[in-house]
Structures are given as C-alpha cells and as structure tokens.
Image: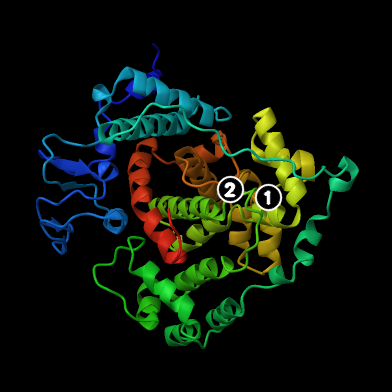
C-alpha cells in the first residue's frame, strides 16, 4: 500500500482545520448534525454571545456557524472528540483513497513544482480528514467518488467548418452585453470627476437599494471583518474607499446580466461559487503582496471565467462539444476550446471587459490569467492565475474544468510567495466563501 511521500513532509496536518485545543465533547463544524445540543455557551472570539447553552441545532444554525467562522463547539452526550484527525491518526486505506482521488484531479498539473506539491498535500489530507469525519458521523467515508454528470449530445454537432465564429460577434449580438448596468456607469463617472467627494459616490450607489443592501452585507461580513457595524453607504465609502467600493459594485452588477444559461452545460450556482472563491483567493494573495486596492483583484477573480458563460449561452452546441472533448481526451478545457472554437474563454472575457471600458489592468488580469507572461500587467494576471489553480484544486464550484491547471514556473518565481502560506489561505477561504456567496445571492443554497 503506497502513500505519496508528499503527505509525510509535515509531521501533522491537524493544525490545518484547528485553531484551538479541542476538549472532550468538542465537535468539529464538519461533523455537526441537526438535533445536536450545545453543552456550553458559544461565543465569538470577540466575546459576543452567539448561541446559548442548551440550544438544539438545526440546519440554519449549521450554516450560520460556518459563516461566523466557528471551527468546533461543545455538544451534549459526546464522549470523544469529533475533529479532523492528524495525519498519523488516519487509516492508510483512507489516505490511499483520498490520494487516488486527488491524483485524478492533478493529472494535468506539474507536480514537480513546490506550489503544486503543497496543494496536492493540502487537498489529499483535507479530503482524507473529511472522509474520516463522515465515517465518524455515519456513512461510508471511503466510497467511490462519482464522476461529474454526463453531458449528452442532444443535437448533431455543426460541421467543423461552421463551428468557427468571429470573436467580436459573440458580444455584439447580445444587446444585454452591449454596456454595463447604468448604475455602475454612473458610479464610474462620479469617481472620475475630480470635483466629486465620497458623499457624491455614496449618493449614486444609494439610488439602487438592492445594490446598497448587498454592498453593506459584504462590508459587514468576514470579507472585511471590521470590528463595528457599518450601517450606511456613506460610511462604507469613507472606510473602504470610493474606488474599492465601486469595484465591488461592479462585481454585484455584472451578476445580473448573465441568465438563461443551459443547465445541462453548467450549474450557475457552482459557477459563481468557483468565481467568488477565486476572487477571495486573489484578494488574499494581493493583500500578502501589499497591493492597495485588493478589491480589484477580487473582481478580477470573480470575472476570470466570464467568457465561458458567453460560450455556454451563445454557442451552446460548441460549448457542449468542448466539455465532451475535454472529458474524452482528459485534456484541460481551455485546450478543447481552442480546438473547437479557435479561441478560449479568457480571450472572450478580456474582449468583453474591453468593450465595457473597464480598467485596463482588470481586462489584462482576466484575458491573461492562463498566460500572465503575455500581460502588460503581469502581477495581477499572475495572482489570478495562482488563485484559479488553488480554487480548482480545492474543488470549490466549477466553471466546467475537471482538472487542476499547471502552474507557469517563471511567473511563480517572480511572485515570490512562500508555499507554507497556502494552508492558512485555504482555511480563510473556507470561512469566507459561503458568507460572501450568500451576500451576493440571497437565495443561494449550498
């Protein structure tokens, strides 16, 4: 029975999920079930009482606990810890099953690179720990993983000579893509006016009650983790910054444009989960690199796969064939796009942002997130490149890609990131992604 040596490069992986010592009767968040009863008051690290002793947990509690970033609670009647086991506590058979699954996901990745090795280690042990927790709380933790849902050729494919389509026509033919929502255009105009103040920006945003509500949810969430509540847009502009808040407004505005995507091609909730998680990851990496407007990187990550939605919406048959081709040949989806369409989703995304006259640096990050060395702003494109690889590895949603993309060694060298930081980043992403999704989509159900 062989276990990949990467898994043993650290003596214990228990710290990955845990920030506190687990006492007797403490149950990890992933092992909680409806009906469990709190044996102690549950308090936020800042001292605020969240739930009282004796509360019987239901599904809404479990979701909220994840949003609050709770990693474990004391439960009545539990005689032993239900927590992610350390590496040495995991059954080798479970580790082997987890490694086998991870190897499939990393089939196209260059595992000789230290960053990919670290991701492989994180993802394998993360999966193994969850499998053990599933066994502990009931169920077959080492059952085979299902393949993605089959994609059927409901209609004959176009002859190859008819599949090619002019790149610009994809956007020109859709009147909904002709321009950004009016509210964002107004915000951009006000910010560009040197005579405008933060109050003017707040006044424009406040014209859209739905947008205002979503932005206030975001600035009051774990996305920022401000110590006190921000209850007005004007205060949000003052604290977050007008350019930063307008960038977030762009992200929320764009989501309204894309509807009526064929469900058999992509699950839009899963698509936006992947996109939002990528945005969060890019923002965290940007913060590490001391980039001032980290919201710009969040939106770049949020929009990085936007071109795929256009393919699925306007070239549904060809889009279906790219998914089939990638699955049959076990290649990366973007290579199937090149083969079937003659271009890929990143080119479409860059073209769309260019048409919208968005900041050039944002356009470049989207268009070159698979080839940062071609960008005129390689730092931002590289950050989205790394974040996309990270989120694909973690399996947080999907835009259709089944594999972890390879990393470009040269851009990683230029970025100069320590590989050991990513265990913490993964932990933070897990805590933020669900809350941010709920803030963007009020009706989102994980």
Q: Earlier in the sequence, mark 1 or mark 2?
A: 1
Which residue lies at the image location 55% right of the left edge and 40% below the top edge?
Answer: 411
Marks 1, 2: nearer the viewer:
2
Rendered location of residue 210, percent (x, y): 47, 77
- The correct choice, above or below, for 233 with respect to 72 in the image is below
The CA distance from mark 1 to mark 2 is 11 Å
- Residue at the top extreme? 1
The answer to whether the residue labelled 1 contacts the one labelled 2, judged by CB atoms less than 8 Å apart, is yes
Which residue lies at the image location 37% right of the left edge and 76% below the top edge?
Answer: 236
Rendered location of residue 105, percent (x, y): 52, 31
Which residue lies at the image location 50% right of the left edge and 58% below the top edge?
Answer: 297
Q: Callout 1: 10 Å neighbours few (<14), some, many (20+)?
A: many
Q: Secondary structure at mark 1?
A: helix
Q: Callout 2: 10 Å neighbours few (<14), some, many (20+)?
A: many
Q: Is residue 164 visible?
A: yes
Between 145 and 364, the one lying in front of the other is 145
- Residue at the front extreme? 35
Q: Which residue is mark 2?
A: 399
On the picture, is 163 further left or further right than 128?
right
Q: Secondary structure at mark 2?
A: loop
Rendered location of residue 424, percent (x, y): 32, 43
On the picture, is 171 further left or further right than 150?
right
Rendered location of residue 70, percent (x, y): 24, 52
Q: Which residue is mark 1?
A: 345
């Amino acid at each position: 029975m062989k276990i990949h040596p990467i898994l043993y490069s650290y003596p214990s992986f228990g710290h990955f999920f845990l920030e506190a010592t687990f006492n007797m009767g403490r149950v990890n968040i992933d092992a909680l079930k409806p009906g469990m009863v709190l044996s102690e008051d549950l308090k936020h690290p800042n001292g605020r009482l969240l739930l009282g002793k004796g509360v019987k947990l239901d599904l809404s509690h479990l979701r909220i606990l994840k949003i609050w970033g709770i990693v474990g609670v004391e439960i009545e009647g539990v005689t032993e810890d239900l927590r992610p086991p350390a590496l040495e506590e995991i059954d080798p058979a479970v580790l082997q099953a987890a490694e086998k699954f991870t190897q499939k996901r990393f089939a196209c990745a260059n595992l000789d690179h230290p960053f990919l090795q670290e991701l492989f280690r994180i993802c394998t042990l993360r999966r193994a720990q969850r499998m053990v927790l599933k066994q502990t709380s009931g169920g077959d933790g080492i059952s085979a993983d299902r393949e993605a849902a089959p994609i059927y050729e409901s209609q004959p494919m176009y002859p190859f000579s008819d599949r090619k389509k002019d790149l610009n026509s994809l956007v020109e033919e859709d009147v909904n893509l002709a321009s950004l929502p009016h509210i964002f255009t107004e915000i951009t105009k006000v910010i560009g006016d040197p005579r405008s103040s933060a109050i003017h920006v707040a006044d424009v945003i406040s014209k859209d009650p739905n947008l205002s509500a979503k932005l206030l949810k975001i600035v009051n969430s774990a996305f920022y983790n401000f110590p006190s509540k921000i209850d007005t847009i004007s205060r949000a502009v003052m604290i977050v910054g007008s350019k930063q808040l307008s960038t977030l407004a762009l992200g929320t505005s764009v989501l309204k444009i894309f509807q009526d995507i064929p469900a058999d091609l992509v699950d839009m909730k899963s698509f936006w989960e992947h996109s939002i998680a990528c945005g969060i990851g890019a923002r965290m990496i940007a913060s590490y690199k001391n980039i001032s407007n980290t919201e710009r990187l969040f939106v770049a990550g949020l929009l990085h796969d936007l071109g795929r939605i256009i393919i699925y919406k306007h070239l549904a048959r060809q889009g279906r064939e790219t998914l089939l081709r990638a699955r049959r040949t076990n290649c990366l989806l973007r290579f199937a796009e090149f083969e079937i369409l003659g271009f890929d989703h990143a080119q479409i995304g860059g073209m769309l942002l260019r048409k919208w006259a968005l900041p050039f640096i944002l356009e470049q990050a989207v268009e070159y997130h698979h080839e940062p060395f071609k960008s005129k702003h390689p730092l931002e494109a590289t950050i989205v490149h790394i974040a996309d690889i990270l989120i694909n590895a973690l399996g947080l949603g999907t835009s259709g890609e089944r594999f972890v993309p390879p990393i470009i060694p040269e851009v990683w060298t230029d970025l100069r990131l320590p590989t050991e930081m990513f265990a913490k980043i993964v932990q933070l992403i897990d805590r933020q992604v669900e809350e941010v999704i709920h803030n963007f989509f009020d009706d989102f159900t994980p």
